[in-house]
Amino acid sequence: MKTIDITSDLELDLRDQVCPYAFLQAKVALEDMAPGQILRITLCGRDIENVPRSIKEEGHEIIHVQKDGDSFMFYIKRCPNASNA
Amino acid sequence: MSTNHFNDNNEPEAHSSADVSQKSTPADAGDFDQLKSGGFIKQKQKDLFTIRLQVPGGRMPLDKLRKAIEAAEKYSSADYLHLSIRQSVEIPYVNYRDIPALQMHLNQADQAIASCGHRVRVPTACSGCEYNPNGLVDTQKLASRAHEQFFGQDTPHKFKMNFSGCPIDCARSSEADLGFQGAVEPEWDEDSCVACTICEKACKENAIHCDDEGKPVYNPGNCLACADCIRNCPTGAWRSRRTGLIVRVGGKHGRHPLNASVVAEFLPEERVPQVIQGTVQWYLANRPDNEKLRLGDLLRRTGMQSYMQSMAEVFGECAVKEPQPPAPVIIHRNGDKRI
């Protein structure tokens, strides 16, 4: 796995969240951030499939993923045109 | 003795318009002629019919549903509509004398009556890629076009078409005379990959294994073309190489179900009408004399070669090499005795 140094503006550990709250927490956090800022979320289990997929569908960009044992850290760039609903 | 006739699917035989008009009906015989393609199913009860409506792909616009409810309130003695197994809406308990008036009522919303008997039936479909997250192709559009173009055409026996948007196959393309299922062949782009190994976890078929560096190794022999890898890749390193349809032929349900044969893979959407046309033509040209046979039973008798040869131009590079004929699915304890 490539290791890249990325600084995040906000970190959320969503490993204890039940679907769909993990996604909703990430979505709400991204909406409060400025375009271009980076959110880092930590996920495990089936959420590593569903949550990033939904975040991409919202229009945000996942710029990096890092494995950490059984968990994954996703670096998400808040996109300017992402839906703000 | 009951006047009901049952066919292989234990479905009451439809009565043609001729059967209806033989009785002293006040309606113009011309009205019944328009209903030649069926859609009336005789009930056990004297003079009563179930009216089957065309609902291609199970999608019923609200104005049509409203008219169906009004028509049922006016002409049916039951207080419900029935949802058929093939996504149709049926109005039961209609006296045959009221059929022309009921049809005129439905006409106000262009709600047509469906078909029964030996012809191309109304296709079924899942919701497709429009809003279903698993959907890979627009099954609603495909079913609607197939319906407009082929509905009611005469065939040697009933001819059913099902459209599924993905390999989960909710619309049971494997149980239709002609079935279509959306499929995506994935390809991997090394430059976009961050070696996170999520694709390996997302793939339920063991078609992706990641090496020690986290890079995926793809085994197409295990792949069902579901696109889970593409959907779940965070960085877009998995992409579609080919999107199209798996084509299945000769399936059926009923007393003696047949599991359809996969005859083409990743067929481009625009070739679907040619596949339907070619398959119906082959079916008509190869029908046995004096015998009613479903397409799958006919293919079991002829073998697949003749059909594949006649479809070679349409299937082209998508044709499956030497497909097996449709295979029996035994659902009854003594269901294997007739094979």
Image (spheres, coloured by chain):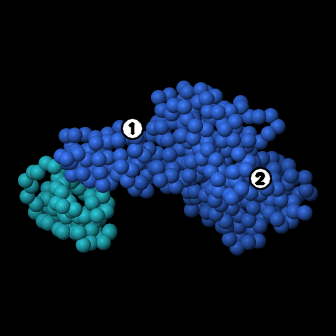
Determine the residue positioned at 70% across, 36% down.
Answer: B301
Whether residue B316 sits left or right of residue B102 in the image: it is left
Determine the residue positioned at 12% across, 65% down.
Answer: A10
Can see residue B280?
no
Could you give the CA–CA distance between mark 2 and mark 1, rounded to whole angstroms?
Answer: 41 Å
Whether residue B47 sits left or right of residue B7 in the image: it is right
Q: Which chain is blue?
A: B
- Residue where numbered disc 1 is placed: B242
Q: Which chain is cyan?
A: A
Determine the residue positioned at 52% across, 55% down.
Answer: B170
Q: Is mark 2 on a helix, strand or loop?
A: loop
Q: How far from the left and from the top, in percent, is residue B15?
A: 81, 53
Q: Which chain carries label 2?
A: B
The quadrant of the rendering that contains the N terminus of chain B is bottom right
Q: How far from the left and from the top, in percent, is residue B14?
A: 78, 53
Whether residue B219 sits left or right of residue B268 in the image: it is left
Amino acid type of the residue that numbered disc 1 sits on in the rendered structure: Arg
Alpha-carbon neighbours of circle 2 within 10 Å: few (<14), some, or many (≥20)? few
Identify which residue, B277 or A47, lies in the foreground: A47
- Residue where numbered disc 2 is placed: B7
Identify which residue, B328 or B244, lies in the foreground: B328
